[in-house]
Image (spheres, helix red, strand yellow):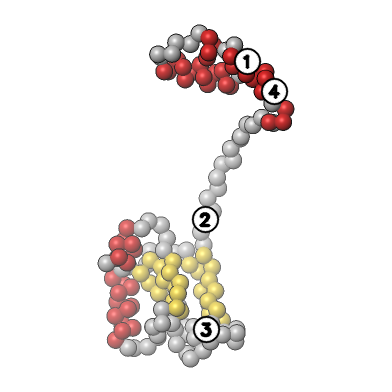
Amino acid sequence: MIIRNYVSTTPGCLLLVSDFNLHVDASHYMTKRFVNLLHSFNLVQHINSETHSNGHTSDLVITRCDDNFLSKLDTFNLLLSNYFLIHCQLNFTRHVTKSKLHAFHKMRSFDIDKFCSDLSNSELLTSTPVDDLPVLVDCYNSTLHT
């Protein structure tokens, strides 16, 4: 139930990669149930070759049936382990963010005494009505901006 809710309600691409400890290349009834379960969630398993030195496929790469970001999927026996290396290419478009201009003041050259003097002589403290919030906000913004 949790998996069904997650898979059906989570937006975006889905990629599951793991050792499922289930030989999906075998014709065992549990394997068939697992594959049917994947199909019922609109998922597909992409590994079609052995992923273990014993000749079975237990490491799986799973995506939604509609996802098409996976390409060039290969397995390699590097002889470093009894598990094979799974290599694939994920095709995603990179979102380019617009750069923002940030203005700042050098704090070392900031004259705190002049700032306090300017602030105490500003309209913000001398002539702005205290009971009119929009006027106060405008005065505050213009005083600190100048």
Relative horizontal placement of residue 82, taking residue 134 as reference (left or right):
right
Q: Quick one: 4 or 44, which is closer to the camera?
A: 4
Q: CA distance from mark 1 to mark 4?
A: 11 Å
Q: Is residue 86 above or below residue 91?
A: below
What residue is shown at x 58% (from left), y 21% (from top)? 145
Considering the image in quadrants, where does the N terminus appear?
A: bottom left
Packing grade of label 2 (10 A; few <14, some 14-19, many >=20) is few
**Secondary structure of the residue carrying numbered label 4:** loop
Disc 2 vs disc 1: Cβ atoms closer than 8 Å?
Answer: no
Query: Which label number is shown at residue 118?
Result: 1
Disc 4 vs disc 2: Cβ atoms closer than 8 Å?
Answer: no
Q: Is residue 58 above or below residue 38?
A: below
Q: CA distance from mark 1 to mark 3?
A: 72 Å
| Three-letter amino acid code of the residue under disc 1 | Asp
Disc 2 vs disc 3: Cβ atoms closer than 8 Å?
Answer: no
**Secondary structure of the residue carrying numbered label 3:** loop
Q: Is residue 96 above or below residue 71?
A: above
Q: Position of residue 113 (x, y in %)?
A: 67, 20
Residue designated by label 2: 93
Q: CA distance from mark 2 to mark 3?
A: 31 Å
Q: Position of residue 7 (x, y in %)?
A: 34, 63
| Three-letter amino acid code of the residue under disc 2 | Thr
Q: CA distance from mark 2 to mark 1?
A: 51 Å
**Secondary structure of the residue carrying numbered label 1:** helix
Residue designated by label 3: 83
Closest to the camera, between mark 4 and mark 2, is 4
Residue designated by label 4: 111
Disc 1 vs disc 4: Cβ atoms closer than 8 Å?
Answer: no
Closest to the camera, between mark 1 and mark 3, is 1
| Three-letter amino acid code of the residue under disc 4 | Asp
Q: Earlier in the sequence, mark 1 or mark 4?
A: 4
